[in-house]
Amino acid sequence: MQNILLLGAGRSATSLINYLKKNAEQEEWHVKIGDFDIKLAEEKGGNHPNTSAVQFDILNEIQTKDEIAKADLVISMLPARFHPKVASACVDLGKHMVTASYNSPDVEELSDIAKSKNILILMECGLDPGIDHMTAMEAMDNISEKGGKLTSFKSYTGGLVAPENDNNPWHYKFSWNPRNVVLAGQGVAQFIRNGRYKYIPYHKLFSRYETIEVNGLGDFEGYPNRNSLKYRTIYGIEEIPTLIRGTFRKAGFCDAWNIFVQLGVTDDTYKMEGLENMSKRDFINAFLPYNKTQPIEEKLCLNLGIKRDSETFKKLEWLGVFEDAKVPISDGSPAQVMQAIMEEKMSLDPGDKDMIVMQHQFEYELNDKKYRLDSSIVSKGDDQLETAMSKTVGWPLGIAVKNILNDNIKLRGVQIPIKKEIYDPILKELNNMGIQFNENEIEIKD
Amino acid sequence: MQNILLLGAGRSATSLINYLKKNAEQEEWHVKIGDFDIKLAEEKGGNHPNTSAVQFDILNEIQTKDEIAKADLVISMLPARFHPKVASACVDLGKHMVTASYNSPDVEELSDIAKSKNILILMECGLDPGIDHMTAMEAMDNISEKGGKLTSFKSYTGGLVAPENDNNPWHYKFSWNPRNVVLAGQGVAQFIRNGRYKYIPYHKLFSRYETIEVNGLGDFEGYPNRNSLKYRTIYGIEEIPTLIRGTFRKAGFCDAWNIFVQLGVTDDTYKMEGLENMSKRDFINAFLPYNKTQPIEEKLCLNLGIKRDSETFKKLEWLGVFEDAKVPISDGSPAQVMQAIMEEKMSLDPGDKDMIVMQHQFEYELNDKKYRLDSSIVSKGDDQLETAMSKTVGWPLGIAVKNILNDNIKLRGVQIPIKKEIYDPILKELNNMGIQFNENEIEIKD
């Protein structure tokens, strides 16, 4: 019997836990689920004979060491800030660790000790980061194996609502942390295109998207994420002339969201005054120039150069930002007010399914010919528990755990899933579970 | 003999030191000038019999206590981050302290002990902050003394170049820290106008200025500074419907500067890659969309909606941003690159005089009539040492020192110059020294 300790049993752990339970008997696993909320841990474990639950507090150092000492492998679904703590205890006690969160300098510096203790700390093994790395590396390894030279790599991922439940003009509902959606893109987007460095400030980001068709699903808009440049080193493609990683929204989203960015209502750096007496209409007006007589709708259209009968304006109106109703919170930043307004309208309804869309676009040269390979994943949720987000984050973790405990993955130290030894078994099993790539390759004629 | 310890003998201390020397004999002062650079301290003291110089290191705690212990009053012209250290030593040793820098929570919390030790810590006693507080409070006190009710207060200050040396299309040269000029306005501008809170994000700031005529000097553009709202409490005008504090530039500046803001080249939050191989032209191009054939000038005009033959475009061209010459630095943030480019063109030439322009606009009601009072100060530098900036920062400090040591100012604790006891003697003497207000009052007929 091998002991798996899972820390954190929240929403995003659902599919992971189901995967672990399904495999537990055959793989001879005992899965202990630790959460600050013991009820949640018990509920997620169900009555499965190979699971147990424990009230777990990461701030309790004695308990942390105690529980990790009893495990063979630890999966951390805790908030990212706790990962260095967990990783450090795992290294001390000689236990493998797996997470779906971004690697960090604090964790990275444990790599040498982890190697010396013969353990693996596998970071970024969920969806994004996770499946994005694995599928990108698989395609790039294939291209270089056959002697091709990669000249361009663009990759976009979006967490959206399934088309059958898409019933609002934004074609968007919150399928993950709404706060991150409101703050998405803040900072500067950095990438390289045809050998030229490009930097897009946040206030220009939502007007500089590309429109991309994804097979059968219509047009999407892809806007660049913060720092694409660092992926040249991570993926070992330092000399690539074009590298852009970005986020997908359905067509029409970016122009409308850009209005909020232009107004400044996505700012999370200060608290607003006077919210307790503000209507949604007053809230928007606080970001527009003073004008004694002009209605807010007119002022907004004039100041931001949109038409009253445009699709963009209809989206704003649908969200209710011109209503006389009070803003939903009486204290907070503009971004927090916007989030609350959006949550009233953009949450998933019971029965709604979410959808993950990921597309990689590669261009490469081989034998004096140029090729373009588009490769996309579309994954829909089954229901409100087994969401696409939960599956695509949880399954890669679960499969990684299986292959580490089976000794198929022998890499040690701090790793992310960019090596074939890791991505190969994970992508194969994901494929069997229905997370499949749709590939399309064409020769480019200049 | 009373002992004054002046810490920091840099450029901005010139006029202060000259003021202190001029008054030293009559007032029976000994002025000890401390600077990390002893040569600078000696040079600024000259051979004046009432001065001495000392090599001073604020990080040397023993020396700091030692020197402060020997003084009756300390003037700190050190970088603002050192003021809490100086203030704390002054409080410990029971010595008055005066600075031209912003008050801070660290200093503010010393107020009660300072009172109990019968000492005054006078902060914000330079130009801005300083003269702005004093002149505003004087006018507001006058209005309320005669029974008027203040309904609007707008105040703008700018550090510019004197008209006789204004020979570039921006009508601007650096008369103080260029870095702060490049970063000016970052964050969000918060103010209140006709009872409505207004928030302007940085990327809209330079398109939402007001054009204001200052007597005899032509048109200026005033854009709001970061947080005007807090001045309601500071000035005791909590209920005022309109309060805006801002910065002055000459007409035409804001539209052109706005192009840089829109491009994102004033961002100081990240380091750019590839600067070592970039021309100024490439630098600008890094912030514009990729286009294989379109020249950068055309692309910029098209993307940012300006005309090739506009005054705005001429300003950009004059700065040299479309030149093939290398960018002046090979490592740094966009803002650092911009600063270096601007310093090549916008520095004061030898012999150039700087100019300070400050304007307050008050509106008030009295006996059922409405009045508007405009009150402005224009001060020019004498030469490159006695600049307008140095005089308007240094003289208020010097006059404050005189009145504290003379016991005309009896206030104790941490203060800023908003009380008549402080501003009255300072403004009177400034007036005699040529820093004079030009006032203009009219009745407003609706």
Image: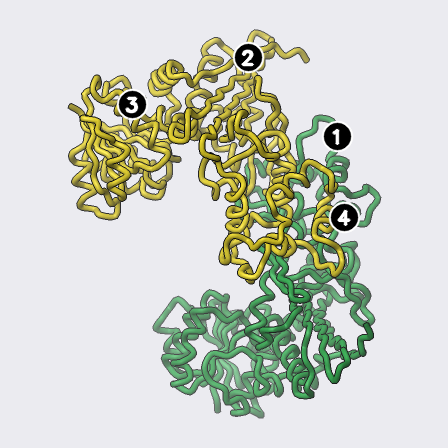
Chain colours: A yellow, B green
C-alpha distance separating marks 3 and 1: 49 Å
**Does mark 3 fall on the same chain as mark 2?**
yes
Q: Is residue B244 above or below residue A10?
A: below
Mark 1 = which residue? B294
Task: For mark 4, name the chain.
Answer: B
Task: For mark 1, name the chain.
Answer: B
- Image coords of residue B300 (percent x, y): 73, 39
Quarter-of-image position of residue B333: top right
Q: Which mark is residue B283?
A: none
Q: What kind of residue is marked 4?
A: Trp
- Image coords of residue A230 (percent x, y): 48, 33
Q: Is residue A221 visible?
A: yes
Task: For mark 2, name the chain.
Answer: A
C-alpha distance separating marks 2 and 3: 32 Å
**Residue drawn 61% across the image and 34% down it:** A169
C-alpha distance separating marks 3 and 4: 58 Å
C-alpha distance separating marks 4 and 1: 21 Å
- Image coords of residue A125 (percent x, y): 37, 28
**Residue drawn 41% across the image and 81% down it:** B114
Q: Which mark is residue A440?
A: 2
Q: What kind of residue is marked 1?
A: Gln
Q: Which mark is residue B318?
A: 4
Q: In front of the other: label 4 or label 2?
A: 2
Q: Which mark is residue A411?
A: 3
In primary-sequence order, the first of circles 2 and 3 is 3
Quadrant housing the C terminus of chain A: top right
**Residue drawn 78% across the image and 79% down it:** B441
